[in-house]
Image (cartoon, rainbow, N blue to C red):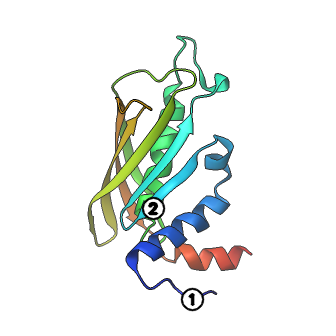
């Protein structure tokens, strides 16, 4: 195993990079990892034609998945393997074909085995598209250790 990063910022980025490298779903949707910090992350996705539903706007499942990816990177940023325990989303405005959406996750609280996170989805004009709230559950193990075990 490589050396564990020495700062919380470097650790968060190393965890996000390791997870992103293994995350075929996030990559397959064209989601880019923009930022990762302790308890935070930002990701971006462009709405493609295959993401448009019958009303001509982005399917809510893709919006949820974008927010969920940001949430995952944020709650795993402390090198403790963590999964979603529950999530909800409120759709505020439609996302359209070609919109560039950014999801920014922030840790609200992390205690014992659970944490709470908010994720804000905005379009390229900074307009709010959706608000996501996630509750995390800490498993046993390390994000970075899994990276070497899977190699």
Q: Residue 37's quadrant in the figure?
A: bottom left
Q: Which residue is drawn at 65% across and 22% down?
A: 49
Instruction: Find residue 36 and name its label.
Output: 2
Q: Which residue is drawn at 44% across and 32% down?
A: 124
Q: How many C-alpha atoms fall within 10 Å of the one at disc 2: few (<14), some, or many (≥20)?
A: many
Q: How many labels does the image show?
A: 2
Q: Does the rendering let one see residue 141? A: yes
Q: Give the residue at mark 1.
A: 3
Callout 1–callout 2 Cβ contact below 8 Å? no
- Indicate whether 14 appears above or below 20: below
Q: Which residue is drawn at 64% across and 47% down?
A: 25
Q: Which residue is drawn at 43% across and 31% down?
A: 123
Please identify the quadrant where the C terminus is shown.
Answer: bottom right
Q: Residue 125's quadrant in the figure?
A: top left
Q: Position of residue 36 (x, y in %)?
A: 45, 62
Q: Where is residue 142 in the image (x, y as percent from the top left)?
A: 52, 77
Q: On the picture, is 25 further left or further right than 83?
A: right
Instruction: Find residue 13 and name its label.
Output: none
- Indicate whether 82 appears above or below 65: below
Camera-side residue of 140 and 49:
49
The residue lying furthest to the right in this view is 151
Q: How many C-alpha atoms fall within 10 Å of the one at disc 1: few (<14), some, or many (≥20)?
A: few
- Give whichever of discs 1 and 2 has the lower sequence position: 1
* SS of the residue under disc 1: loop
* SS of the residue under disc 2: strand
Q: Where is residue 144 in the image (x, y as percent from the top left)?
A: 57, 76
Q: Does the rendering let one see residue 79? A: no
Q: Where is residue 1 in the image (x, y as percent from the top left)?
A: 64, 87
Q: On the picture, is 80 further left or further right than 3?
A: left
- Indicate whether 60 appears above or below 2: above
């Amino acid at each position: 195993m490589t050396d564990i990063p020495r700062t919380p910022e470097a650790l968060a980025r190393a965890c996000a990079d390791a997870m992103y490298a293994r995350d075929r779903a996030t990559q397959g949707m064209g989601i880019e990892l923009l930022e990762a910090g302790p308890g935070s992350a930002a990701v971006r996705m462009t709405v493609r034609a295959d993401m448009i539903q019958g009303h001509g706007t982005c399917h809510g499942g893709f919006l949820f998945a974008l927010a969920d990816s940001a949430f995952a990177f944020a709650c795993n940023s402390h090198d403790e393997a963590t999964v979603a325990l529950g999530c909800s989303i409120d759709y505020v405005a439609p996302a359209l074909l070609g919109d560039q959406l950014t999801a920014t996750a922030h840790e609200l609280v992390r205690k014992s085995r659970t944490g709470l996170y908010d994720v804000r989805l905005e379009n390229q004009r900074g307009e709010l598209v959706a608000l996501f709230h996630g509750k995390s559950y800490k498993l046993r193990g390390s994000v970075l250790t899994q990276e070497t075990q899977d190699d």
